[in-house]
Image (cartoon, coloured by chain):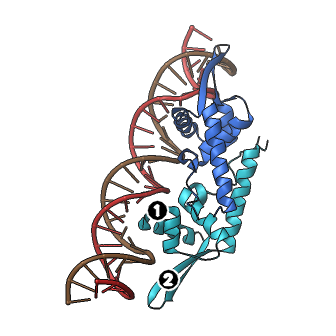
Chain colours: A cyan, B blue, C brown, D red
Amino acid sequence: MKNPITGLNKVFDNRIRLGVMSILLVNEEVNFNDLKQMLEVTDGNLATHLVNLEENGYIKVHKGFIGKKTNTTYAVTKSGEKAFTDHITALENMIKGIK
Amino acid sequence: MKNPITGLNKVFDNRIRLGVMSILLVNEEVNFNDLKQMLEVTDGNLATHLVNLEENGYIKVHKGFIGKKTNTTYAVTKSGEKAFTDHITALENMIKGIK
DNA sequence: AAAAGCACTTTGAATTACAAAGTAAATGAG
DNA sequence: CTCATTTACTTTGTAATTCAAAGTGCTTTT
């Protein structure tokens, strides 16, 4: 049997980052507050994971305005989408017990 | 959209524990050395994750002998199997983007 | 104008992960 | 038989990670 955990992406070991990615895959653009409410995490905690995902090039951040109020939205990048689907594929293969 | 990461099991946030479980789901009984080689981890590292899984009641340990040599095998428990499949189900739902 | 809210950043503490070193028993080489 | 090596761990120490709480700057509400 080959090593089942090769192909698993370390970035997605974390539930919150996993959650962010899954939300962003089905929703084109999501802002900070919506993410925070969907995932039920503290803002500081969410922010650090978002930075992490951005540093990895998996999401892109768009700092815009609604009137004078900042409205920052997050979206997956091509690379992020690939990384995530690759991770899921690796998971599926792992579960199927590739020998 | 409901929180997509509820239902995700913290124990399975870790790749090595995930790997152990997936191996034990498709292989009835696996010994320490085989796990170590399959997962390509150091023995100390593997041992701590196995202890963790055992403490959570997800695997059972059988310390036996082959002749005079110890042969410790690991197997999933009913509870471990359920926890793992529940986790996978939660993952699948998350990916599908349940709203 | 003061208080509160938003979207973060920074800080600090607790937990976790991991490698390396240590241990005890068994096997193998000379 | 003796010494070195292997196996299956345990213990130890450090590095990394996670997270909440506090802080910041701007806006909005009262």
> Is mark 1 in CB contact (under 8 Å) with mark 2?
no
First reached walking from the N terminus: tag 1 or tag 2? 1
Q: Secondary structure at mark 1?
A: loop
Disc marking residue A71: 2
Circle 1 is placed at which residue position? A41
Point out residue D21 in the picture as x, y percentages from the top left corner.
31, 62
The answer to which image quadrant residue A15 occupies is bottom right
A59 displayed left or right of A85: left
Q: Nearer the viewer, residue D30 or B81?
A: D30
**Residue A93 % position (x, y):** 76, 49
**The image quarter in which residue B6 lies:** bottom right
Give me the residue at 78% from left, 44% from top. Answer: A98
Q: Position of residue B90 (x, y in %)?
A: 63, 52
* Above/below status of B76 relative to A48: above
Q: Are marks 1 and 2 on the same chain?
A: yes
Q: Nearer the viewer, residue A14 or A4?
A: A14
* Label 2 crowd (10 A; few <14 / some 14-19 / many >=20): some
Q: Chain of mark 1?
A: A
At 47% from the left edge and 69% from the top edge, which residue is drawn? A47
From where the camera sits, is residue B40 visible? Answer: no
Type of residue at label 2? Asn
Q: Is the N terminus of chain B in the top left, top right, bottom left or bottom right quadrant?
A: bottom right
Quadrant location of the C terminus of chain B in the rendered image: bottom right
> Above or below — where is D20 with respect to B59?
below
On screen, B10 above or below C24?
A: below
The chain holding disc 2 is A
Q: Distance of mark 1 from mark 2, alpha carbons? A: 19 Å
